[in-house]
Image: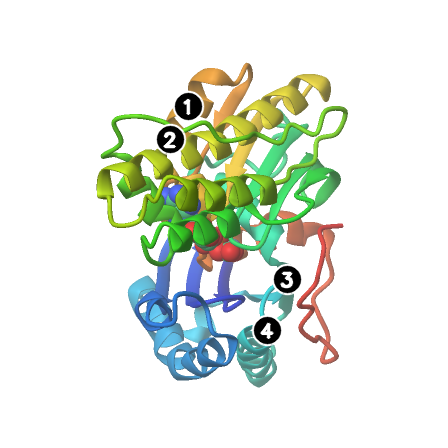
Amino acid sequence: MRILAFETSCDETAAAVVEDGIRILSNVVASQIDIHTRYGGIVPEVASRQHVLSIVPVYQEALRRAGLELKDIDRIAVTHGPGLAGSLLVGVNFAKALAASVGLPLYSINHIEAHLYANWLAFPTARDDTSRFPALCLIVSGGHTEMHLMHGHGRYSLIGRTRDDAAGEAFDKAARLLELGYPGGPAIQHAATKATGRYSLPRAWLPGTHDFSFSGLKTALYHLVHREHLLGHPELVADAAASFQDAVADVLIGKVSKASIDLDAACIMLSGGVAANATLRNRIATEALVEVFIPPLSLCTDNAAMVAACAYFAGARKLPSGPDLDVEPALAMK
Ligand code: KG4
Ligand code: ZN
């Protein structure tokens, strides 16, 4: 089964064709990072307008790279939430019109759920293989930090989530404080490679829960920056970046490892943009007590191949969407 998928929930316009949920025939991502960098963050209206400009060429390129025409596609899938309303609208409208014009079934996909399916793309297994369940899934992106226990395809229980900032959001705000630019995750990671020392920063363990909190860490970094007059001293900024990165990694790894034991998970699956972080990737594989899956970098950040994989695996439990499909900016995982 060949699924053509679209992803426009934030600042990437993406289209992909995936066969049987695991073979990527094309995966096209048009990033808007250069545009938003000028503003130091994503400007929603600018993002929507850029999606309007990019969606047609990105769609055409996805078919061209796959060597296919629309008549070779069996299903269309699109992210309908969570995300920026204006951005989601572009992908949803385009996918709806395309599906209606050729009579293909349209599957609406949750962006968070799609992130975790990057693991099925990167580490393929049959749809009826249950050996990875229950899987403890940690989704760490710019807008979300959530842990779900995955009992089967499309079946989850929420285990914990951030009570304030998402991990990616914390990276972005920390990078802004340290004047390292946008997006913050890669900038902090790069600066941290030059660190020679560490500052002491807090970790919010929130004992007795599997929830996360990063706002206290962000405030502590703010006070550190001003107390120690770090700005303008690249070697001190590097130490602060590394200290911040260590604190986030400690909490993510510590909490996901504990949850995997508490809940008797068969494995841990990491996904979302922050799963691209080298320190997190290197440490979690050695520190966790169960098998850990982490997709390659290109499948951690936003893409449409993960949306197609989700539509194949989890879609087996869902009906196609009808003409009343709308965007759901605050959509949660069910
Ligand atoms: O999943 P994603 O591409 O988009 C959303 O769904 O939000 O995640 C974007 C987030 C940004 O906050 C970005 O700073 C973070 O992922 N990120 C990283 C790294 N690469 C991207 N965070 C830490 N280290 C990285 N290498
Ligand atoms: Zn995302």
Q: Comparing marks 2 and 3, which lies closer to the viewer?
A: 2
Discs 1, 2 touching: Cβ within 8 Å: yes
Mark 1: which amino acid? Arg
Discs 4, 2 touching: Cβ within 8 Å: no
Circle 2 SS class: helix
Circle 1 SS class: helix
Mark 3: which amino acid? Pro
- C-alpha separation, residue under disc 4 versus residue under disc 2: 43 Å
Q: Residues within 10 Å of mark 3 (few under 14, many from 20)?
A: many
Viewer-nearest residue: 228 or 161: 228
Circle 4 SS class: loop
Question: In the displayed structure, does residue 121 sit left or right of residue 29?
Answer: right
Q: Residue at x 36, y 34 (%)?
A: 242
- C-alpha separation, residue under disc 1 versus residue under disc 4: 44 Å
Q: Residues within 10 Å of mark 4 (few under 14, many from 20)?
A: some
**Can you identify the residue that label 1 sits on?**
283
**Can you identify the residue that label 2 sits on?**
279
Q: Is residue 276 above or below residue 305?
A: above
- C-alpha separation, residue under disc 4 versus residue under disc 3: 24 Å
**Can you identify the residue that label 4 sits on?**
104
Answer with mark 4 or mark 3, whichever residue precedes in sequence.
3
Discs 4, 3 touching: Cβ within 8 Å: no
Q: Is residue 7 above or below residue 111?
A: below
The percent position of residue 320, horizontal first and vertical second, equals 70, 66
| Disc 3 residue lies near ligand 1 with CB under 8 A | no
**Can you identify the residue that label 3 sits on?**
82
Viewer-nearest residue: 218 or 262: 218
Circle 3 SS class: loop
Q: Comparing marks 1 and 3, which lies closer to the viewer?
A: 1
